Amino acid sequence: MSGMGGIEVIFRKLVLAAATLLGVGYIVVDIPIVILLSYQFMQIPIDSAQHIGKLAGITLFLMASILLIILGCFFIVGGLQFYRGGTHRGVIFLGSLLASFYLLCLGLGSLLMVSQINLGAMFLIISPVLVMVAAPIYMGRSIPFKLIGSFLGIVGGILLSVAIFNHRVLESVFEWGVPFPGPFMSMATMEAIVAILGPVTAFIYSILAKRNEEPVAHAFLSIVGLVYGIGMFIGSQVLAFSFLDLLWKAPYKGEILYGLPQWFFGTVAFWSASLFLLLTASIMLIVSSCIGFVFTAQEFAQL
């Protein structure tokens, strides 16, 4: 197979592989998080308002972990639908709502964990609410609705990027001194950029969808995939090796993981190993984004 058709088939297969690995990666990575959060929940006594706040915060973190597992399933379904060439508007819509609820749970949980007003946590609450309002508006058929929805999404993306820069979500519950990435396990800087680029791409697509300039929007989609893939490649590696370093130094730095059961260390090691699934997914995402640029260039050539 040659020409446009051959490149399109390769592109669709790579997107399917990247989406499947990304979905499975999120599912597997969240398993040790749920186990460790459940252990922390069991260790906190109900004897003060502060402890009750932490219990409520951990409960919201557990809800967020379950939502991310479900979101991982949506990645797999979305990849299959994209490969088959079917409509995937419904999956994108529900996926964006799930991601928003996930971020909202993280923001509320962080606010309860720190027991004080935190600007990053507040923005992590406001931004997903804006996206949840923007998503159904954007799904409307008329162009004005799409423009309004994408504009609200851009505002929410800007607030989310500020939150990601100023607040490491998992550091509030796992105080291990490791460089936790953004909420989606990608490098915080890259994730903040994607938070803005995503709604900007939706805005551009809503303008160009009815014209013969869709390759511009497709180019932006490839940029989003490339930036996110690079961020996940770096973020997953840094966190995985930070966990390994923490486990290696545990006998010498007992104040961090002192008095914990043996299975706790095994769970952290499993968390570290599971991050290599996301590392593999990021490589596939980077490759598929590069192929996407080739596919977009051929679309431009046919205009």
Image (cartoon, grey):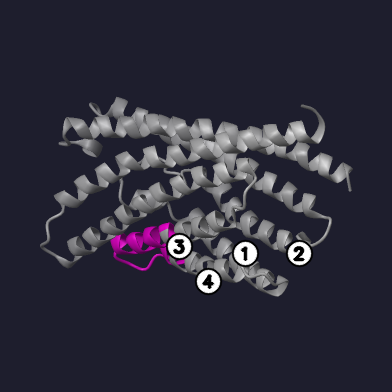
Verify whether residue 80 appears in magenta: no
Q: Image height check: is 62 above or below 268?
A: below
Task: Identify the residue at image location x=23%, y=36%.
Answer: 257
- Residue 276 in the image: x percent, y percent? 45, 30
Q: Is residue 5 left or right of residue 165?
A: right
Quadrant location, the N terminus: top right
The residue singled out by tag 1 in the image is 154
Mark 4–mark 2 Cα distance, whole angstroms, equals 20 Å
Mark 2–mark 1 Cα distance, whole angstroms, equals 15 Å
Q: Inspect the image, locate mark 3, and give the three-letter code of the amino acid beneath it.
A: Leu
* Number of numbered labels in the structure image: 4
The residue singled out by tag 2 in the image is 207
Asked if the residues shown at circle 2 and circle 1 are in contact, with their CB atoms under 8 angstroms apart, the answer is: no
Task: Identify the residue at image location x=50%, y=32%.
Answer: 279
Q: Image height check: is 214 above or below 179?
A: below
Mark 1–mark 3 Cα distance, whole angstroms, equals 14 Å
